[in-house]
Image (cartoon, coloured by chain):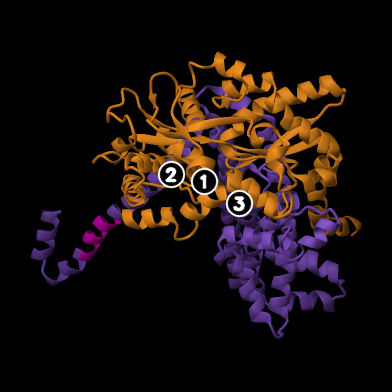
Amino acid sequence: MKRRTLLATAPILGPALAPAIVSFRSLAAAPSDLLNASYSATVELFRAYNALFEESWRAKTGTPVTIHDSNGGSGAEARAVIEGLPADVVTLALAFDVDEIARAGLIAPDWRSRLPDGGVPFTSTIVFLVRQGNPKEIRDWPDLVRPGVQVVTPNPKTSGGARYNILAAYAWALKANGGDAEKARAYLGALLRHVPVLDASARNATLSFVQRGLGDVLIAWESEALLAIAEAGKKRFELVMPSLSIRAEPPVAVVDKVVDRRGTRALAEAYLGTLYGPEAQELIANNYYRPRLAAVARKYAARFKPVPMVSVDEAFGGWDAAQKMFFADGGIFDQASVQSQ
Amino acid sequence: MAADAAAALAAGPMGARLRAPVRTRGARRVLIFVAFAFVTVFLVLPLGVIFAEAFSLGARAYVAALADPDVRAALWLTAGIALAAVPLNTVFGLIASWCLARFRFRGRGAIVTLTELPLSISPVVAGLLLVLLFGRGGLLGAFLEAHGIHIIFAVPGMALATIFVTVPYVARELIPLVEAQGSEEEEAAITLGASGWQTFFRVSLPKLRWGLLYGVLLCNARAIGEFGAVSVVSGAVPGQTNTLPLEIQALYDGYRVQGAFAAASLLAGLAIVTLLLKAALEWRHRDELSAARRARAE
């Protein structure tokens, strides 16, 4: 009888205990760990950087620290932080997403001025990835809208990184047409007609192109394209630099509300500050992002080919304006999508 | 075939009756072939691909992929969440089926319908509902934040999401069973002096055990495999808030295809074990059913 009663309580005790057991570890580890909510295309970079930082922090302070990464699309990570993901720092694809978190009151509005280079420790740019030998002879933006060319690019509504792709295409079209916005919009519509599928994230689009063999050209961040070339093995893909591109500036910021509550500000600031140091900058270049530090940039000059670039701030008046003009409902991207159907 | 048909025609009215079976035999063969082809293309081949990819770099790489700390953490988390969801839904299923079969009360139909709600709601919506409830900007967000309780983007939220989507499995299995069985045996037990617990464990539970086990298996399979609802409320931190299905996606997105398939082979293995258990249960269930039928006939 006793045993039976015990058995009967097991189903009730089980559920009560299981989450407690599972979450115990994360509670016990509290202030000596740090959570970085990062943009999915930086998984490899931050896995390497976390190991570097853990080592240097222990060497400097004598206390061990563990860095965890939450990975997802830039917008999805920003959304998660706004809804309560306790990330101490964010490393996202575009300033707009950090501003969204700032608007929710979790990051101070002056986050750009608290770190060097506007809180952007490394950059990238938009390039074309084509199959080996460049069979469709893709050299520049106009080649993407030639008959029979299929273009792979992610959906800029869901992929923060892909917004740079659209802005780069528009910036080129605007310049090529002598500033005629109507013609630039028409080019965007023509470009979207050549996109067979709009993947949800940048990495999904890369995998569509690289592993599923979809399309003739992938519009991607240079970092993503170089990584794809490295991962795919030799001689399967080639990089093509367009005649005009855009500077991709993935920002980093401390989430003030979270670090103040958890008492991790010093750790979080050190984590982001160290990104600008020579060791981290070398790691950044090794992970195919363009370093800020001139000495490291010189060393890797062969990897990162020079290309004329506009910036979102110069060409579009910043992310708030670009977002409203291009990616809000009924914006230029929506108009171009309708045109392309 | 043509000769058969001609012979059948020649046999006149008597042969006309034979014509149908001949045609049916052909249709039978085609249908069986279609069924096998379908199962092979859509079920067996993908399963084979999983294991082929998992072992594509050799057995050592397979073991190394499973020994990865993030994969192991994902496995434990998946087991922990199933351990929370399955017993809870088993108890709920027992209570619900008991109440619904024994008592007539207002709102009874509503409970039956609501129990099935998670089957008709998209898991993503279920996850978003939890965010709206427990998220920082949600209904209970301010209260939870003030007390330092983390539910969304943490393990409790993932457990809640799993519990939500697995509610129907045990209850749905038991409700018709309890209703069909009536309460004569329980009444007899109580008349003979059995206590409530004794009646439950010695009379009611044995009658339901196969149905119950079947429901628990389905519930467990869904709890282990759930992706949509859990991905909405997961913190997506490898080693902390990635269940196996989420870890598989993270591995795949990180160019670690073989690792992703190695982890997927764990899930596929669990699915196969569940399937075998279910088949075994159905066999035993059938024996018992026929035994019961024989006993009644005697």
Q: Which chain is orange?
A: A
Residue labelled with disc 2: A166
Residue labelled with disc 1: A159
Give the residue type that dot 2 points to.
Answer: Ile
Residue labelled with disc 3: B226
**Magenta part of the protein: which range?**
B20-28
The dot on residue A202 is none
Q: Is residue A213 visible?
A: no
Q: Chain of mark 2?
A: A
- Left or right: A279 in relation to B228: right
Q: Chain of mark 1?
A: A
Indicate which disc, 2 or 1, sits on the residue closer to the N terminus. Answer: 1
Q: For the residue labelled by badge 1, is the local secondary structure a helix, a strand or a loop?
A: loop
Q: Front-most of A216 and A323?
A: A323
Give the residue type that dot 3 points to.
Answer: Glu
User: Residue B267: image x %, image y %?
Assistant: 59, 42
Magenta stretch containing residue B23, yes or no?
yes
User: Residue A41: image x %, image y %?
Assistant: 56, 35
Q: Which chain is purple?
A: B
Q: From mark 3 to mark 2, how far is it between C-alphas? A: 35 Å
Q: For the residue labelled by badge 2, is the local secondary structure a helix, a strand or a loop?
A: helix
Q: Assess whether mark 1 and mark 3 are in contact (beta carbons under 8 angstroms).
A: no
